[in-house]
Amino acid sequence: MTGAEATLFVDAAQVVTCAGPARARRGGEMADAGVRVGVAVAVTGDRIAAVGPRPELERAYPDAAIMPCGGRVLAPGWVDSHTHAIFGRPRADEQELRAAGVDYLEIARRGGGIHASVRDLRQRSDDALFMLALGRLRRLAAYGTTTVEIKSGYGLSIEDELRSLGVIRRLAAALPMRLVPTWLGAHEIPPEARATPGTRNRYVQMLVHEMLPRVAEGGLARFADVFCEPGVFTLDETRTILDAARSAGLLLKLHADELAAGGGAELAAALGATSADHLGAISSAGIAALAGSSTVATLLPGTMLFLGRRTQAPARDLIDAGAAVALATDFNPGTSPTPNLPLVLMLGVSQLRLSVAEAMIAGTVNGAAALGLADTVGQIAPGFSADLALYEVEDVRELPYWYGDRRCVASWVRGKACSQFDLAIT
Ligand SMILES: [Zn+2]
């Protein structure tokens, strides 16, 4: 290793390493975020090479460039493992309707909800969708997020789902952030498939036999996801779709038990899904199933807050049972339009009763595990990708404290400055 390509990150008040096993942290393992004081971080090329006392690293890398951290906190870049970032217009109108007491069925009857986003996306060009998502993902990056999972799911036709996944591929080439594409053709039953009895089943068959093969052949997605919830896709339909997706080489995710306990968490564990997401209404059997499996429980407290619900997923019960919990934004136009992952960590502490260390692990290591990337990102430890973020705070406990405020001052992905970072938010 030559010193010329090395950089030493020095003078951080704290380095939150999250270092440990390269896998999901479960139960009590989440209690330690590996906060270190008085250490520097050596980056060579796109990797973290060493964490240790500055004099030691200066001897090992005598020609290294110096990146002064100025008494701030250095942490792994956030891994936002659940977003729906490919969409058209914001649905700000629905927020006011909800406040006035209009329920989601009535909002849908008036032309709102997921179907509003579907109609909107189908009318937009690929370039328009690309430009909208580009700006929105830069906002996620501005809060310290360096890895983002992005789902399709507002197309709900072969053409429009493939277009959405194609836009994600273009974004991955255009942005320094690490993007993980998920096929969510099973986000909803589209209106045209609701017309007559039997068309619903034809939509599921079309997903499995026509859309999925195109997604897999094109290498357009790493994950397949299904909205498994009473009134959306049933357990049987979910199993049919995800079995086919696994056979096609995709990893699995589920939207499970968001509003009602319908056995989604149990199905995720039985299928060996990488994650089960939402879980606002998970049953005790579901908690036990996840705790006894390798499936990460991904919680989205911003969604419950935004919808004005007074309940949250039982994060404490999940962790105490031995499950691995991740936190993500659920960034989407209808139920969680926030790009701010530290705000979600604040909700993790204040609403889900996580410790700061548990919230940090949930936004880094366990987010990475929810994307099958636990050996690549989420830790400041030798061999991991140099995905870093620097915050204008002196103590890690301030990250989920200054809620809503953007404290991230710089971020790096694969050892390179996240190029969008310094652009003004306009
Ligand atoms: Zn979602």
Image: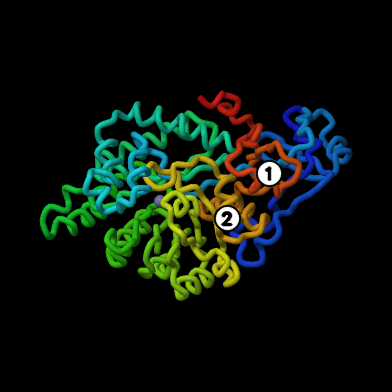
Query: Percent x, y for residue 290?
Result: 49, 68
Query: Percent x, y for residue 8?
Result: 77, 34
Mark 1 or mark 2: whose residue is earlier in sequence: 1
Give the total number of marks visible in the rendering.
2
Q: In this figure, which residue is indicated by the disc labeled 2?
A: 348
Taking the spot 55% from the left edge, 50% from the top edge, the residue there is 373
Q: Amino acid at mark 2?
A: Gly
Do we see residue 182 in this rendering? yes
Asked whether disc 1 touches disc 2, contact meaning CB atoms under 8 Å apart, the reply is: no
Taking the spot 25% from the left edge, 48% from the top edge, the residue there is 108
Residue 338 appears left or right of 54:
left
Query: Percent x, y for residue 259?
Result: 38, 62
Taking the spot 49% from the left edge, 61% from the top edge, the residue there is 312
Location of residue 115 by image quarter: top left
Is 390 placed above or below 311 here? Answer: above
Mark sitting on residue 75: 1
